[in-house]
Image: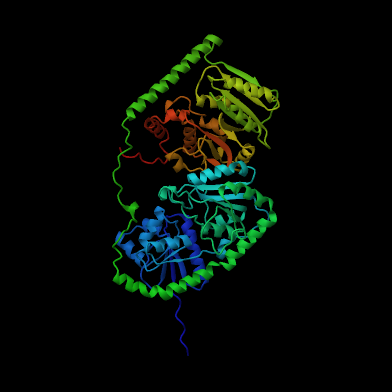
Amino acid sequence: MSERPPAPAPVRVFVAPTGNGFMRDIASWLVEAASLAGRDARLVDDSLPTADGSLDLVVAPHEFFELFDAPKAALQRAAAVSVCVCTEQPDTPWFHLSVDACRRGVVSLDINPVGTAALRSVGVDARHLRLGGVPSLAVPTHGDRPIDVLFLGGLDDRRGAALAELAPRLYRHRNELRLFRFDRPVTPATPGVVFGADKSALLASARLLVNLHRDRRADLPAGTVPPAYFEWARMIEAMANGCVVVTEPSEGFEPLVPGVHFVEATPDAMADAIDDLLADHDRRNAIAAAARTAVMDELSMVHEVRRVLDELERDVLPRIGAHLASADPTTGLWRLGGTKVTPPVRLGPFRPVRDLQLRAKQVAMAENAALRRLDRVACVLAHGTEQHVERVETAAYAGARPEVSVLVTLYNYADVVTETLASIVASEDVAFEVIVVDDHATDASRDVVRTFLAAHPEVPMVLLGKDANEGLAAARNTGFAEARADLVMVMDADNHVYPTALRRLADALLAAPDASAAYSILEDFGAQRNVRSALAWDVDRLCHANYIDAQAMWRRDAWRELGGYRADDDHVYGWEDWDLWLRLAERGGRATLVPQILGRYRVQAGSMIALTNLATDDAITAIRGRYPTLPWRPFPSR
């Protein structure tokens, strides 16, 4: 009677319990593929690898060993018995941390051939683990895909500038830009980010996925051109769900073929590529079908993982005991574990002229107050009252029944306000009125608006011209009090909206009755190209800094319940919108992000925020004291 062959070695796939959710997704694919390949496989996030006869794969070692709570020596011994699965781009800080763990083991894997070569160049025995599809990646699709263009990725300056360039074409499409920041772990609790089955469902609802490379300039010497890294994990997820990938030119995509399985386009040509694909149903479907077959069948991860595990069991597993006995895993460079070290006491920012800046701000604020008193005196002399408001209406204003009131506050923007009003007037599929509040501008702003109203009698518009300046907060409150619609869009006089903005923001509020406001991503133009207001509502992030611009649509009743913009406190000068967002958060309310670029933000020097930033400590202290129940972060040591 022949002996039964021994069972294959079990597989343990380790991943950090509090790390980025993207790594847990990759770890889950490995477990699924290993199980389908006949292995006893499970995911582990609560213990360290040991030399117990199992194949121990550590996904994203830069996270696992950094975040696991254990002594340094224990982490180093665990790395020595592990097969590290590296996921990061070469020459990044995360890649360097991975190298420290990889050097302790017998062999390492990398999901990209570029990363594999980089590991080998520093002396690591590295092998390529090609990602592919597993059955759970693909979800059933039902009929039409409601999203034309999808973007999923971390936001940096390079990607922000590229998305800003696409904005004039994207706004016409049904697009969704799911952005996040890499300034903290991206977990299932991170607002606006999806993982696992939710991500697959999102990809299955999209026609195109746009892929833009990460900004690598800070990681490399000046003038160095980084490899165009092919983001395999993101590509596999999209292709498995029939979503066509449009990516910048990349390296390391073989055996996939550009033009057959995905589309390559330079940033300058990407808008045309998107439009062409959306217009060509047959070509799009052919690419989607070829890519799905490639990743789910030809590049099935089950086949790749079976090959790799068999190789590891044959060539690596028998060597681990001797390797651990003969090598000292606690020697050599180990930069991991920095977050577990008591941080050094840091001094606050070196600001030798801090007191001078504070006095300068106080002088400037006092000058503003004095000018407003003079305005009131002049108004009394001219009109017998401290405030007089000139009212100019278009012929269409009186009889209008708007769904949205668009509020434009105006102070010394005579050269650009016409562009702003023209962008509003171009709005589509929505009944709106425009309320312009001139806060006693000292240039020709009021005359410019009068001329615009006279040229557009068919558009419901009203100009409220104040003869005494009262400040931005008071001007906005004046506009809200005039608004007749239940929804009020707040705009500065130098910004723009795309024609679809009002309709889509209004629809977002109709779909989210618990939201007090809706905001969209804004395209920076002028002095810089980037995007802003791009992250989902997150109270923790809001307490760190204001990341949501004032250009948003409010429910008028919610504004009223919050008491409007604070107009009686110099501490919030320039931060009126942040103060209102914080008040909303403190009362348990929220705003909803429409993840599309629907507006444009003019970047220029000399705005009122420059005066605000002369001295911020007193203002931040006052705001924290006003909303003590919010999750504020500690002040830095001084």
Q: Is residue 269 above or below residue 422?
A: below
Could you tell me which residue is drawn at 65 percent across and 48 percent down? Answer: 275
* 420 horizontally vs 570: left or right: right
* 118 horizontally vs 168: left or right: left
Q: How many marks?
A: 0
Residue 406: x and y, percent?
Answer: 61, 31
* Image quarter hosting the C terminus: top left
Could you tell me which residue is drawn at 55 percent across and 10 percent down? Answer: 382
Could you tell me which residue is drawn at 41 percent across and 47 percent down? Answer: 222
Q: Is residue 599 above or below residue 35?
A: above
Residue 288: x and y, percent?
Answer: 63, 59
> Which of the 4 quarters of the picture holds residue 197?
bottom right
Residue 188: x and y, percent?
Answer: 49, 53
Going by the picture, which residue comes out furthest to the bottom?
1
Residue 603: x and y, percent?
Answer: 51, 34
Regarding residue 38, the answer to whether it shows in the image is yes
> Which of the 4 quarters of the picture holds residue 626?
top left
Could you tell me which residue is drawn at 69 percent across and 53 percent down? Answer: 280
* Colour mapping used in the image: rainbow
The residue lying toward the viewer, choosing from 326 and 478, is 326
Q: Is residue 472 above or below residue 590?
A: above
Regarding residue 142, the answer to whether it shows in the image is no
